[in-house]
Amino acid sequence: MKTKVCMLLICLFAIASLGLAQAKVDGKWAATIEGGRRGPAMVTIMLKAEAGGKLSGTWDQGGRGGPTMIEEGTIAGTTIKFKRKQMGRGGAGDTVTDYTGTLSGDEIKFTAIVEGGTGMPTEFTAKRAS
């Protein structure tokens, strides 16, 4: 009987800690993404964890058209995933970038990969903004 109660308590604590890890992603995040022909890009990311492991938010690079919505966002423990679409150059179709991040305190370490692209993944760190 004691073993069952202990196992139940362990499971409850594990579930509670998972919920706490997800709640820490909410808010404003700032990052500088190095590279590209135009030099470093300053990015502001707004994130919100929702029920069922869903993640919503916006991505703002300060360019034309303003912030864009993140799509297909998920959060599982400390792992964050989402997609972002942006208009292709010269009227080309949309470019879709897949982002995977690991939340650790006030930082998220991201890897970004352009779908169908041949380039190397881009890595950057977003920090919680005030």
Image: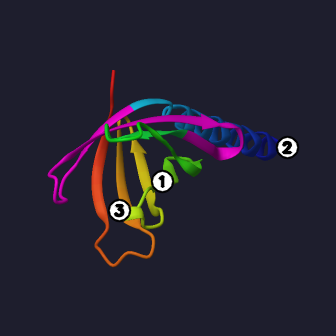
Identify which residue is drawn at 33% across, 79% down: 118
- SS at circle 1: strand
Q: Is residue 2 left or right of residue 103?
A: right
Q: Which residue is mark 3?
A: 89
Q: Which residues are magenta?
A: 29-56
Identify which residue is drawn at 40% across, 67% down: 114
Answer few, some or many: residues within 10 Å of disc 1's Cα (few below 14, many 20 plus, some between 14 and 19): many
Query: Extreme front residue here?
Result: 91
The x and y percentages for residue 38 are 16, 53
Q: Nearer the viewer, residue 130 or 22?
A: 130
Please state which amino acid type lies under the numbered disc 3: Arg
Q: Which residue is mark 1?
A: 84
Q: Is residue 62 left or right of residue 2?
A: left
The majority secondary structure of the magenta stretch comes to strand
Checking the image for residue 71, the label placed there is none
Quadrant of the image for the N terminus?
top right
Q: Which residue is mark 2?
A: 1
Identify which residue is drawn at 65% across, 45% down: 53
Label whose residue precedes the other's in the sequence (2 or 3) = 2
Real-space Cα separation, disc 1 to disc 3, in angstroms: 15 Å
Q: Nearer the viewer, residue 125 or 62?
A: 62
- Residue 100 image-quadrant placement: bottom left
Nearer the camera: disc 1 or disc 2? 1
Answer few, some or many: residues within 10 Å of disc 3's Cα (few below 14, many 20 plus, some between 14 and 19): few
The x and y percentages for residue 56 are 58, 40
Real-space Cα separation, disc 1 to disc 2, in angstroms: 50 Å
Quadrant of the image for the C terminus?
top left
Please state which amino acid type lies under the numbered disc 2: Met
Answer few, some or many: residues within 10 Å of disc 2's Cα (few below 14, many 20 plus, some between 14 and 19): few
Label whose residue precedes the other's in the sequence (1 or 3) = 1
User: Was residue 34 drawn as part of the magenta stretch in this picture?
Assistant: yes
Identify which residue is drawn at 50% across, 51% down: 79
